[in-house]
Image (cartoon, rainbow, N blue to C red):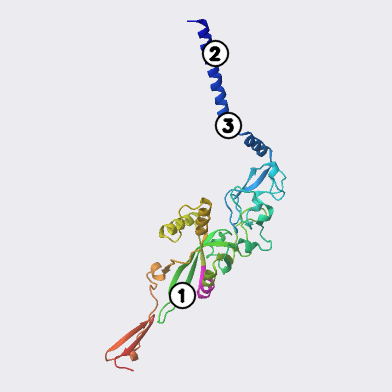
Amino acid sequence: MDVRKIVLMIGALVIAVVAAVTARNMFTGSSVTPAQAGVANQVKKGPEVLVATATLPVGTLITAEAVRFQPWPEGLVQPAYYIKQQGGVDPASLVGTVVRNEISAGQPITQGALIKPGDRGFLAAALGPGMRAITVKVGTESSVAGFIFPGDRVDVMLGQNVAGTGDGPALKVSETILRNIRVLATDQRLTAINAEGKPEVRNFSTVTIEVTPKIAEKVAVAQMIGSISLSLRSIADNTADLERAIASGEVSVPEGIDPKAEGKILLAAQARPIDEGSTFTVGGDVSRYQRKTVPARPNDPSSIQSGPSVRVIRGNSVTVIPLGAK
């Protein structure tokens, strides 16, 4: 073979290899642009600021899992941010504070966005839009022995004695009248953290809860009727109730909606207090020696008619009307 042709083939092969290596380096380096590399270096060198780990709606009680420190571009840091390097904040000290303005996931938390317990307007800020706060009296045995803390969710039960119109003992009944109710405060305690920064269990005599205006009226009447007891809910119950509400059509999510808007709808539905579908238990369900129905009116011999008559029943009242009587 001609030497000249061999040299040309070797040269072409070398050029092809060089071109392939150059193209590979170009495509590999294209995933990180110079601007992105500059931002990455800036974030790495910047301070750590406190950000929200999830979307925090207005009135949210801050927990230890709701916030974390994250590196932030030094040129974008504002004086109102909580900055780790300055040693001015411990995330544990913010537990129990309330969100004044909605904070998106990953957004830095500003010092004016949170209200601390004891500050003016704290309880009003803790309330969701259109909600009300009402206080109920409870005892040690009816408040889960003090293991209910602000931010927990409870069911409200009403216990009462129904005397009826007859003789004998009254009907004893307990009824779950409200579900998924958020606790705002126990006595005047707005957080479960004590002065040493540790959770503390205390007995209390009153509980302030978040309800709608209509439910507030029901709670006021319930306290006149009988005694109030609280039942602590599991966190998993909220998800189960939400799934049932979606399946039954109570909560509808439009198709093609923005994921962020869909999350807000589901979050609002999950947090809503429920005053429908109440359940009850009577004394006869617990003991065979208790009643299952309201005591009835005893028969009055003087009211027994010898002729034909019509019995008119209105609730627990029975009226005998002789036929032909005016």
Residue 188: percent from left, percent from top: 63, 64
Foreground residue among 272 and 166? 272
How many tags in the picture? 3
For marks 1 and 2, give the one nearer the viewer: 2
Q: Give SS at disc 1.
A: strand
What residue is pinned by disc 1?
Answer: 161
What's the magenta bit mostly, secondary-structure-wise? helix
What residue is pinned by disc 2?
Answer: 11
Tell me which label, 1 or 3, sits earlier in the chain: 3
Looking at the rendered structure, the kind of residue marked 1 is Asn
Q: Give SS at disc 3.
A: loop
Tell me which label, 3 or 2, sits earlier in the chain: 2
Q: Could you give the CA–CA distance between mark 1 and mark 3, rounded to whole angstroms?
A: 77 Å
Q: Residue lying at the far left in this picture: please name it.
A: 307
18 horizontally vs 281: left or right: right
Looking at the rendered structure, the kind of residue marked 2 is Gly
What residue is pinned by disc 3?
Answer: 30
Looking at the rendered structure, the kind of residue marked 3 is Ser
Q: Residue at x 64, y 36 (%)?
A: 35
